[in-house]
Amino acid sequence: MKNVFNLVLLLFFTLGCKNTPNTSELFKNIDISHIENEINLSNVSKRVKYVKIEDDEGKIIGSVDKIINYEDKMVLVDKSISKAVFVIDSVGHILCSIDRKGNGPGEYLDIKDVVCANDQIEILDRQGKIEVYDFEGNYLHQISLDVEYGKALCKISGKDYLVYSHGDWSKDGDIERLFFTNEVGKVLSSFLTTNVVSGFVNFSSGNTLWPNGEEIFVSSSLDNSIYAYSNSMVSKRIVLCFEKYSSTESPYNTKSNDMKEKFLKEGGAYYMDKFMITNDLLYFQFLYGSRMGFYLAVRNIEFVAKKFIGENGIMNLPIHLNNNCLYTIIDYSNIKFYSNSNLEPNVLSFGNIAFDANSCFNPLIAIYEL
């Protein structure tokens, strides 16, 4: 059955590549009226590799909010629980960690974003500064930005920065901007000045900036659009149209409460959250009504589902795209839930890795080659 499925996929890939649009602005119609309950990523991938995070010192990664590939290493960012950054090798051994919460030199209050360049790890703190470390976790220096309330960060040409700031609600109604700064944090220009109160444009709450090649992609959730920043210009690149609702019909673009209620009752998809994009792959999460959906396009073959699952029927949460690979997280709490739900034994097998739901506390990384 799987061979037949793969043959169908191959035919779709061949036909899809012939119809790839060659345009700077692509409108994608997403029909969520035919959303699948679940899609097994093992059935749509060529192969899967599992990376079990190992650490002899008992370091615990609470969650993985971001993965960065850097040479032969992976950098894992936990913004919410441990509020730390971990460097692991290709087989999952933790090489070093950066865990310096505080107000002093080399310390941060919150991790808003992380970038890696020039053999350095740079952490964006909400206080408008970037703390810089090497790949052994040693503190190097600080960059003070002329930008407050920074939320996302991208490195441009190895030195300059693109910074997304959500503004100060008490002062200016939560003005949102993209700032282009030089290597010492001085603002050179700004883009897409918006205001949440007016309901015009709002960047998504997921990974707001996504680099791909020479471009940096920016998501706007309220009009379901993805913009591209290149050569000091921002242009709309992809507009996602869900069912019969056009991008201009988002409930946030109207002050009518009746219209907002209509969207909620009819289950219209109106909010794009986290997105990721490469030359061949497009992934995003979206809310429709009060529910979460997942979308994955592999060379023009589209999958829309309420959840993505992997081996043992356990849900995989996509975190990262790199070239033609989708990186997902299977955390221990998810495995323990299934283990305690008549799934025996508690030690589950993922490829050649045995994962004990009762003793493993760090997430398991599943890398699908698509």
Image (cartoon, helix red, strand yellow):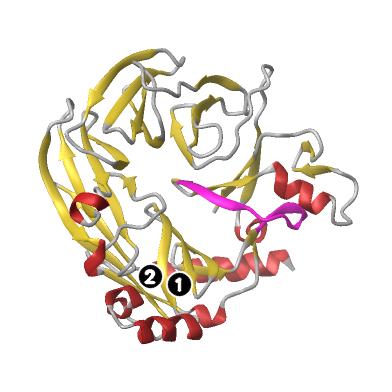
Q: Which residue is mark 1?
A: 15
Q: Are marks 1 and 2 in contact (CB under 8 Å)?
A: yes
Where is residue 346? Give x, y as percent.
86, 44
**In the drawing, does residue 63 fall left or right of residue 271?**
right
Q: Looking at this rendering, what residue extends furthest in the left direction? A: 188
Left or right relative to 182: residue 258? right
Q: Find the magenta span and give its range.
A: 309-321
Q: Quadrant of residue 222?
A: bottom left
Whether residue 154 is visible: yes
Residue with the mark numbered 2: 18
In space, the residues marked 1 and 2 are separated at their CA atoms by: 6 Å
Q: Is residue 9 above or below residue 88?
A: below
User: How dense is the environment of label 1, judged by Cα within 10 Å: few (below 14), some, or many (20 and up)?
Assistant: some
Q: Position of residue 27 (x, y in %)?
A: 31, 73
Q: Is residue 3 above or below residue 366?
A: below
Image quarter in which the C terminus is found: bottom right
Pointer 2 local density, CA inside 10 Å: few below 14, some 14–19, many at least 20: few
Residue 114 vertical placement versus 369 (above, below): above
Foreground pick, 134 / 199: 199
